[in-house]
Amino acid sequence: MTLLTPAIPGLVWAYRFHADRTPCTRLATEASRGDLAVEDGGFLWLHLNLADQRVPAFLEGFGGLQPDAVAALTTHDTHAAITLDEQMVFGTLVDFQREFDSETRDIGWLHFVVTEKLIITTRLQPLRSIDRVRAAVEKNAGRYRRPIDVFETIVAEFQRTLITLVLELTEELNQIEDFVYDNAPRDERRRLAPVRRTVVRLHRHLRTVLALMRRAAAADDDDMPLGFDDVAGRLTSRLEAVDHDVYALQDRARLLHEEIDSKQSSETNRHLYILSLMTAFLLPPSLVTGFFGMNTSGMPFEHGETGTMFAVIFIALSIAIAWFVLRRARIL
């Protein structure tokens, strides 16, 4: 038996979109480089897996890609970037990783290049939003007239994923809040910590993508692909809306953490207060027992049968005096 490998290294999927709005064609896994030719009026979407070490060499030999664009597709940098140059958009977008049987909150990175006739995306781990875009393409390919339309859908799906995640985190905060403000509060800091960490990371990456999108929208028209300014404006509005929700969630998590700390401090102070009262009550009896416990001569009540009884009376009297003093000082 012969083990066959695809002619296109790291190929996850490839779609050829037609100019007449007919359903797009998904290329076979065994497609060759010759199958990537773009027909007039159509375009190609190529999605590759960077786990295949042959992908960089394949992209370097791919016609029409600048060295900077190839570097953007093959980089392992973990920060967002959007660059416009000679009617081309390339860079890195943030997304969420996806397991085979579940979705996670782990951050992943999608690298992309968008030209007039081509969109290439690469990733190292399976990503949540990009898979949803693939499903949308197979369901209704006629809505995608240009590669920039696919790019817009990718960012829009990331925004929808953010909204879903914000709702999940809001529900978790609601549950934590119920325990925090309960009559018998529990220490929910361990449960709150991963929520705060996720929200902070979301807000940081989202603000970065927003800043990059605004800067790209303000770039020179000669470097901007056709229609990108409109796409950037719509995507900026989408991301700004969810950014307000993420910021509000971050602020709420911070206030909730402060409330937990406040309640824990109050509980600690109450314990210290009780301990201080116990010390204040026990100190006078300790002085009495210490005095009668001295092995010196001439101790009162040393001779007789009522010495212990008098010592107990002195201990009780010392406690009563301590209680009276604390009451007069308004400590009790």
Image (cartoon, rainbow, N blue to C red):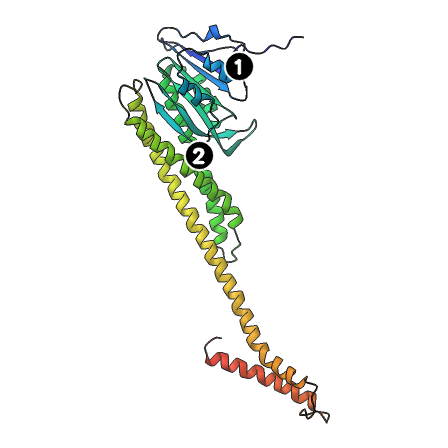
Residue, disc 2: 164
Secondary structure beneath label 1: loop
Label 2 environment density (alpha carbons within 10 Å; few <14, some 14–19, many ≥20):
few
Label 1 environment density (alpha carbons within 10 Å; few <14, some 14–19, many ≥20):
many
Q: Quadrant of residue 18?
A: top left
Secondary structure beneath label 2: helix
Residue, x 52% and y 46% (percent of image)?
Answer: 191
Identify residue type, mark 1.
Pro
Whole-percent x and y of residue 327?
48, 79
Judge from the rendering whether residue 311 lies leftward or rightward of residue 243; answer left or right. Answer: right
Residue, x 51% and y 50% (percent of image)?
Answer: 189
Whole-percent x and y of residue 297?
70, 91
Judge from the rendering whether residue 83 lies leftward or rightward of residue 266; answer left or right. Answer: left
Asked whether residue 70 is in view, the answer is yes
Residue, x 42% and y 22% (percent of image)?
Answer: 112
Q: Nearer the viewer, residue 136 or 126?
A: 126
Depicted 44 relative to depicted 230: above or below: above
Whole-percent x and y of residue 296?
69, 88
Asked whether residue 24 is in view, the answer is no
| Upstream in sequence: badge 1 or badge 2 | 1
Observer-side mark, 1 or 2, equals 1
Depicted 216 relative to depicted 273: above or below: above
Contact, mark 1 vs mark 2 (Cβ under 8 Å)? no
Q: Nearer the viewer, residue 32 or 190?
A: 32
| Quadrant placement of the N terminus | top right
Identify residue type, mark 2.
Thr
**Number of the label disc, if any, that sits on residue 9:** 1
Q: Nearer the viewer, residue 237 or 294?
A: 294
